[in-house]
Amino acid sequence: DQKKAFHFYTLAAEAGDPVSMFKVGYMYTEGVGTKKDDDEAVRWFRMSAMKGVPEAQFKMARLCEEGKVFGGDRMALQWYTMAADQGFIPAKFNLATMYYEGREVKKDFKKAYGLYDEVASTEDADALFMTARMLFEGLGVEQDVEESMRRFSRSASGGNQLAMEFISDLRRRQNTQFIKIDGL
């Protein structure tokens, strides 16, 4: 019963439980057990985030990036950092991307690589792709084409479309070179 769940989560949230605050925010966002209300959702997400729930901190960062709450990339960086410091993997990936792109921070490929590599250790296909790319180009890390190729392969096996395209393109180029070399 979604309405009962909403009722009891709200009671727990009002009593100060930060995880329940996050769940109430989610329920308001999706209109689960209650009427959809984005303002109420943000209010509960913010309270949960301030009490240290990494999922809520991540959600606040996303809302900042999307322009749905005040702060933009500057605040998103702060929220992502808080969640990443608690080990929240999606926040580490998005924080790495901010360092990679130089959004609201100075580009720092070394820091980006370190964060992506932490996420890649969980076999995340997107993080494997980013570390493979950085290893291939020597961005923020010593160039290592062999390790790069291993990671591109693992990323492709994990479903990353860009890694699949990279490997396919590389194979096409190799076949073209063999044809030219062999004269076939």
Image: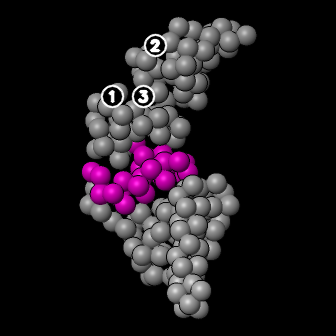
Quadrant occupied by the N terminus: top right
Kind of residue at badge 2: Asp
Q: Name the residue under label 3.
A: 46
Secondary element at image label 3: helix
Q: Which residue occupies the foreground of this view, 103 or 26?
A: 103
- Quadrant (top left, top right, bottom left, bottom right) of the C terminus: bottom right
Which residue appears at 30% of the width and 63% of the height? 107
Q: Is residue 134 magenta?
A: no
- What kind of residue is marked 3? Arg
Q: Earlier in the sequence, mark 2 or mark 1?
A: 2
Label 2 Cα crowd, 10 Å radius (few <14 / some 14-19 / many 20+): some
Q: What residue type is labelled 1?
A: Val
Rendered image quadrant of residue 148: bottom right
- Earlier sequence position, callout 1 versus callout 3: 3
Q: Name the residue under label 2.
A: 37
Rendering colour mode: one colour
* Residue at the far bottom in the pictured view: 182
The image quarter in which residue 110 lies: bottom left
Marker disc for residue 69 = 1
Q: Does the magenta stretch include residue 101?
A: yes
| Residue 32 x %, y % | 60, 15
Q: Are marks 3 and 2 in contact (CB under 8 Å)?
A: no
User: Is disc 1 placed on a helix, strand or loop?
Assistant: loop
Q: Which residue is drawn at 68% across and 9% down?
A: 4
Q: Which of marks 3 and 2 is nearer the N terminus?
A: 2
Determine contact: label 1, label 3, CB under 8 Å: yes
Residue range in magenta is: 79-104
Nearest to the eye among marks 3 and 2: give it: 2
